[in-house]
Amino acid sequence: MSFFLNPELWALTVTVSVPLIYASLGGMFSERGGVVNIAMEGMMLMSAFVSVAFAYASHNAWIGLLAGVASGAAMSLLFAWATLKLQADQVVVGMAINLLALGLTGYFLDAFYGYNGTPISTPSLPTWHLNVLSHLPVLGPALAQENVLTYLLIPTLLGAQYALFRTPWGLRLRSMGEKPEAGRSAGLSVLRYRLSGVLLSGILSGIAGAYLSIGVLNSFNVDMTAGRGYIALAAMIFGNWKPKGALMASLIFGFLSAASIQLQGSIIPSDIVLMVPYLLTVVAVAGIVGRTTPPAADGIPYQEESL
Amino acid sequence: MAQLEVVGVSKRFGNLRANDNISFSVRGGEVLAVLGENGAGKSTLMKIVSGFLRPDSGRVAVDGQTIPIGDPQAAIRAGIGMIHQHFMLIPRMTVMENLILGREPRTRLGSIDTRQAKQEVEDLSKRFGLHVDPNSPVESLSVGEQQRVEILKAFYRGAKILILDEPTALLTPQETDRLFGSIREFARQGLSVVFISHKLDEVMKISERVMVVRAGQLVDTVDTGQTDAFSLARMMVGRDVDLGASRTTSGLGNVVLTVDHLESQLSKGQPLLGPISFTLRHGEILGVAGVEGNGQQELAELLAGIRLPSSGTILLDDKRVDSLPIRRRLESDIAYVPADRQGEGLVLDLKIWENFILRDYYRPPFRKGLGIDVKVAKARTQAAVDAFDIRPNNIDLPSRALSGGNQQKLLLAREMSRNPRIMIVSQPTRGLDVGAIEYVHHQLMSLAQTGTAIVLISLELDELMKLSDRIMVLFRGQIQGIVARPEFRRDAIGLWMTGQKGQEVRQ
């Protein structure tokens, strides 16, 4: 099958998957702590815009990345304030934040850069060349020449796995997602641990957003995340709330997206291929292929001192 | 010196005085029972002691040192360990993860030191004789084992004062005995134990002193050796209570219900119910005993038609009813009082009279043309509310306004007004106070007197032994044994509840 041996397909798969992996790891931390975070879409979008704006203004892509991540974190704090402090419905607040991000970025894009969009002189994050890998067949070109954020994924993934399952913080975070009363009775602050999970999802969504705008490109378009935040959420669910699962699911979704792009103009309609990730998610959530189990207290606000 | 000292604690919720100037103390090596009805303020008091609630006034001291109030962490540090009635355990985590949560031993790298954790857990198990496998997920443990984990958790955090909130509520008699053995061992090792209960016999058996709480006030603290169950009951309720009065079986009628090889496929991962077979006579009360989750709920739902059997038959007189849908089942004079009265039994936001007609609104006398004859509905409801002494008696109030006991009365009133031939009653007294329990028992007995056959499902063995003509024990969905009055024996029934057959003759 020459289709599968085409290095371009695999390079594209990696490009599409990277932001999904970051965001789905973020969603995993949030939900492991018991907070359903559909606001990652908005956090990514905000970061994508802020990264470009700061990268352009400072002529430094790294400053752009930092600012983007900070904006994602700020959005997550807003989300946390509404859902944790005020105990508002997590899905409703999440939607509101997504709409807010869409409106704000659209407005500022227009206000700052006008009709022409973001300037073409915006710097982007460096691409690293690991020539050792380029000799690998098929996958070589995909892996040897990647954005720095792609390589940063490896320590991020390992760190996520370690933090969640080997550290006291991870145990505590998971307890808040399973049964916050138990954590509270152990003298822990439910709010603080849930906040840490949400904040991590903001930071990781921020990286994902920056990757979209100053990683693979150096520009920002209206609604450029185009639902990737939701797909990342789906990948995280499909991956059963585990780092390895989130990685695999994101790669599968990324591959299918890449394949749909490659298939444009062929007999198989690309829209059908693009549909598969969503179908897979429905299948996974419905428990048809191997059951996925969400944290028991996922999405349920916690009230202190309830009688 | 007193280990735990509570001085002048008061707490109000709106107009309710949950705790009114309560003081008490417990010495090291002592077991103090806190006796009171549901709603008397026992749980509020213990939540204050363990830092979960902030009192309006008063203080808590351990070994003479006043501890900060409203701070669970401070209470834990001071050595107060609270064992909640509903376990604070995370089912999907292992015993060890549950134990170390919040106080994890760390390696130099900051990760959890699993070896050290396991060692500490094993040492504690050994010291207090509480054996559990640290690597088992909590969800795979029995209730008694989970309770042991909960107690170990308190010890792991350095508890010297153990507060047990209604610890026997979900245990079999054997597990209760074992728990009592453990409690004596804790006291022997110098710990203080506060044992919260509304069960008189347990309080008499385990405590050195009893503190009685009623309506938020401390009634008295007495030495257990100097009192008896009768006077304790009077202190707890505020009047004389009829403790013993159990039924005598007399003059049962013909067989009205025949259950034959009834079987149900339950949801994934749970045992099947059945095949089970039994019969029920007019005027008979059949008690169904068992540890929670052994098929009682499924049996009730099969009989009521909420769940359809995968095989087997249910005969009402000579008519098969097993495949009838719920409404047809109810129309064949079967009544059902579900265990979850707030979820399944009543619609809390509907008015009292609306709840009263919920089963029969669509047929006479409540139906008028296409609508409901509100006048008749209200008149009937008012009559029932007065007859059952449901308070407040304003039938236009939402059922939410009723206390648990009055909600249960409303449910009973509704089901009994339908003149059922068979009544399925599940956990009718759970969470009720002594007065309401007495009332419900009285109603069920007089219903049986009029010839109604009753299937009574309860976790309270005392209740079953008091009311039933026969007791059937379910274990993992199977009938483990059926025994008829007067051959009820707690120990035998308890063994059946844990799946052991014992030497008893089965009927």
Image (spheres, rainbow, N blue to C red):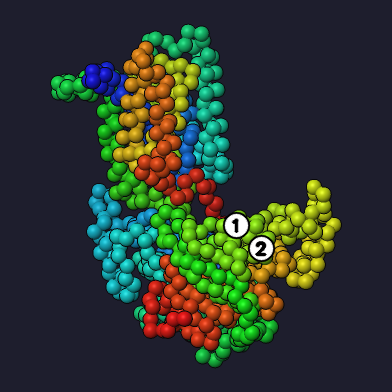
| Residue under the image location 73 percent in, 60 percent down | B356
- Please state the horizontal and vertical placement of residue B364, each as a whole percent of the image: 78, 57
Q: Chain of mark 1?
A: B
- Please state the horizontal and vertical placement of residue B414, each as a whole percent of the image: 71, 64
Q: Which label's residue is closer to the chain start, 1 or 2? A: 1
Up-down relation of residue B317 to residue A229 (above or below): below
Is residue A244 rendered to the left or right of residue B403? left
The N terminus of chain A, quarter of image: top left
The C terminus of chain A, quarter of image: bottom right
Up-down relation of residue A202 to residue B178 (above or below): above
Q: Nearer the viewer, residue B353 or A87?
A: B353
| Residue under the image location 46 percent in, 29 percent down | A41
Q: Which mark is residue B285?
A: none
The extreme top residue here reads: A116
Q: Which residue is mark 2?
A: B332
Q: Nearer the viewer, residue B86 or B375?
A: B375
- Whether pointer 1 and pointer 2 mark residues with C-beta atoms closer than 8 Å, the reply is yes
Element carrying mark 1: loop
Cα gap from disc 1 to disc 2, whole angstroms: 10 Å
Q: Judge if badges 1 and 2 mark residues of a common chain.
A: yes
Q: Amino acid at mark 1?
A: Leu
Q: Amino acid at mark 2?
A: Ser
The extreme right residue here reads: B375
Element carrying mark 2: loop
| Residue under the image location 83 percent in, 62 percent down | B379
- Please state the horizontal and vertical placement of residue B69, each as a whole percent of the image: 52, 63
